[in-house]
Image (cartoon, grey):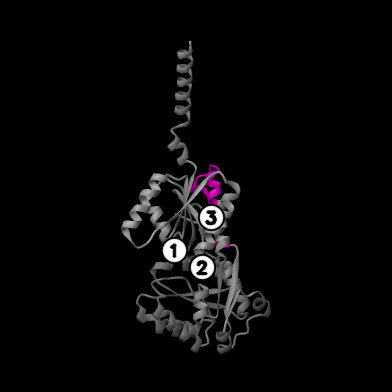
Amino acid sequence: MQWLWHRAIGFVMILVLWATGSPAEAQSSDQVAFLIRDSLKSTTRTLQGARKILRKRHPELAYHTFTITDDSIHNAQVLDSLRELDPRLILSVGTSATKFAGDHFDSTPIVFSAVKYPVLSGFVESMDRPGGNVTGASLNIPFDIQFKYFSEVCPNLSRVGVMYTENTAAIVYQAQLAAAAAGLTLVPHKILDIKDLPRALDSLAETCDGLWSVADPNLFDPRSTRYILLNTIRKGLPMMGFSRHVVESGALFALDFDYKAIGMQAGRAAERILDGEPAADIAVTMADVIWFHYNEKTAHHINVAVPEELVAIAKEVYR
């Protein structure tokens, strides 16, 4: 009778394993992977925000961080490790890490964070309906908020110029609609060749009250950025930069983001996926904690008095 008892127990154990999967398979569903490209302060704060949200709601999951580099052999090892881990989702920080994840995982949910212009980058179909297996938290600041601040800094603002290339044409079209809703006219000037810069700046300085900028890598390389900043100051044309770094270099002001808050937004999107929602249906978020930065020296040179209420809340003042 004892041997019958042992056989019965063995049969039950087989049924349990068949129903729940192997230990390795069960373990794979309890993993979340963070994918990064560097250890900059912005990356660290983004991860802090994401972890804060996820570990509070899902302390039972195991979290693993992987770093890609310029070394293809190292990246191949990272890819092998990720595939072996088989995480429930991948949370990436930055454009490079998101591209790496998207290039190699077409079914694993991917939640990006700290990405500028995710639609232009090809990560999602649209901000509202991402489609596919990717969604996340962008660094985009809503256009209406940008133009609201510009109007506060320059109360007589009416016509705003913008230079762009084919790379950012879609952004400029959307911005024109937002500017019109804010009572402003956005005057676009497409740059086909970097040699067009002097003529474009002359034209915009004559017809516009300010210059708005987009983060266009085909236009704002270090050399052309210096040229643009120097000549807007010379022409007394207030320029809204696309980052605090441009303000530090001479733009009048810019809006910036809190990277920890961006990470928390990504964490909330990841949380929804872990709760069963498809990434395709989760809208990409835009920055919801915004900082004001301005250049006091530039303001003095072009005779712009930054309103006291903005001076009081400025995150950084460059002198």
Q: Secondary structure at mark 1?
A: loop
Disc nearer the start of the sequence (2/3):
2
Q: Magenta region: which residues? A: 269-287
**In the image, what residue occupies the spot 50% across and 86% down?**
233
**7 vs 275, nearest the viewer:** 7
Which one is in front in this view, the residue at disc 2 or the one at disc 1?
1
**96 vs 133, nearest the viewer:** 96
The quarter holding residue 263 reads bottom right
**In the image, what residue occupies the spot 39% across and 67% down?**
167
**Is any part of residue 211 visible from this angle?**
no
Amino acid type of disc 3? Answer: Ala
Query: How far, Cα to Cα, is label 3 from label 1?
Result: 18 Å
| Spot occupied by residue 158 in the image (x, y as percentages of width and height) | 57, 78
Q: Quadrant of the C terminus?
A: bottom right
Q: Is residue 283 magenta?
A: yes
Q: Secondary structure at mark 3?
A: helix
> Quick check: 37 above or below 242?
above
Q: Is residue 172 magenta?
A: no
Amino acid type of disc 1? Answer: Asp
The residue indicated by pointer 3 is: 266
Which one is in front in this view, the residue at disc 2 or the one at disc 3?
3
Amino acid type of disc 2? Answer: Ala
Point out which mark residue 175 bears: 2
Disc nearer the start of the sequence (3/1):
1
The residue indicated by pointer 1 is: 38
Query: How far, Cα to Cα, is label 2 from label 1?
Result: 31 Å
| Spot occupied by residue 235 in the image (x, y as percentages of width and height) | 50, 88
**In the image, what residue occupies the spot 56% across and 86% down?**
297
> Quick check: 259 above or below 228?
above
